[in-house]
Image (tube, rainbow, N blue to C red):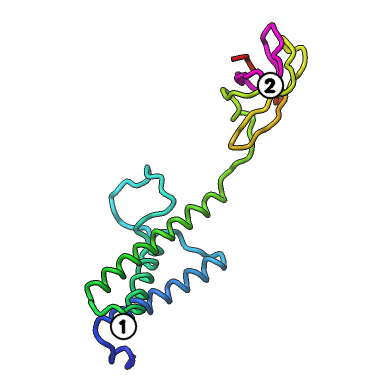
Amino acid sequence: MEILDSLEPLLRMFWFVAIPASVIFLIQTIMTFVGADISDGLDADLDGDLHHVDAPFQLFSLRNLINFLLGFSWTGISFYHTIPNPTLLITISLVVGILFVYIFFLVIRQIQKLGEDNSFKFSQTLNKTAEVYLTIPARRAGKGKIMISVNGSTRELDAMTDQENKIPSGAIVKVTQVDTDNILIVALI
């Protein structure tokens, strides 16, 4: 530690923040890849009711604190000899630390999108409009086909109608119910 004692006070402070933050970050990273990842936040003893907030991660957590300290300290160390004004150096270091937390937030949000369930369910077609692809016979006398968009993908599905007239190709219909055999019941709009 004699090396750190010979440094100027501000640079020494940046190093005293950077070393433990980097060690904790390495431990967190190794634990994440091994599968022994700790939760995104520590259990804090506070009375705030945050369960109604729909956030992908907690703003005040150990991981975010480490991310902030990494950005803050290593920016201060990197630009210490380039930026002679201590106030400007600390300000830039604070901004980079906040930027590290924001980038982590964006990465976590993108990773969480991978866990979304985008599988198709027939119930998602209810009350949606569709275009008739193959003519639908009247009064459930047979099946036709419709083209319907669900979750950004277009599907060709079997359809029937309870109406007295057949529904020609190209007509716009609304899905009113899903039959037990996953056949959509539609009505002309």
Above/below status of 153 relative to 16: above
Left or right for 141, reference 172: right
Residue at 28 percent across and 50 percent down: it is 47
Three-letter residue code for mark 1: His
Residue at 23 percent across and 76 percent down: it is 86
Q: Secondary structure at mark 2?
A: strand
Q: Secondary structure at mark 1?
A: loop
Q: Position of residue 45 (x, y in %)?
A: 30, 56
Check residue 105 for magenta coloring.
Answer: no
Q: Position of residue 153 (x, y in %)?
A: 63, 37
Residue 120 picture quarter: top right
Q: Which residue is mark 2?
A: 132
Chain part drawn in magenta:
160-179
Q: Nearer the viewer, residue 22 or 36?
A: 22
Per the model, the C-alpha gap separating discs 2 and 1 is 70 Å
Above/below status of 36 relative to 157: below
Q: Position of residue 92 (x, y in %)?
A: 30, 69
Left or right for 40, reference 189: left
Would you call the spot at circle 1 few (<14 residues within 10 Å), some (14-19), or many (20 or more)?
A: few
Above/below status of 26 relative to 8: above
Say whether residue 101 is visible: yes
The C terminus lies in quadrant? top right
Residue at 27 percent across and 74 percent down: it is 89
Q: Nearer the viewer, residue 131 or 73?
A: 131
Three-letter residue code for mark 2: Val
Q: Which residue is mark 1?
A: 81
Say whether residue 180 is visible: no
Above/below status of 157 relative to 97: above
- Which numbered disc, 2 or 1, marks the residue that appears first in the sequence? 1
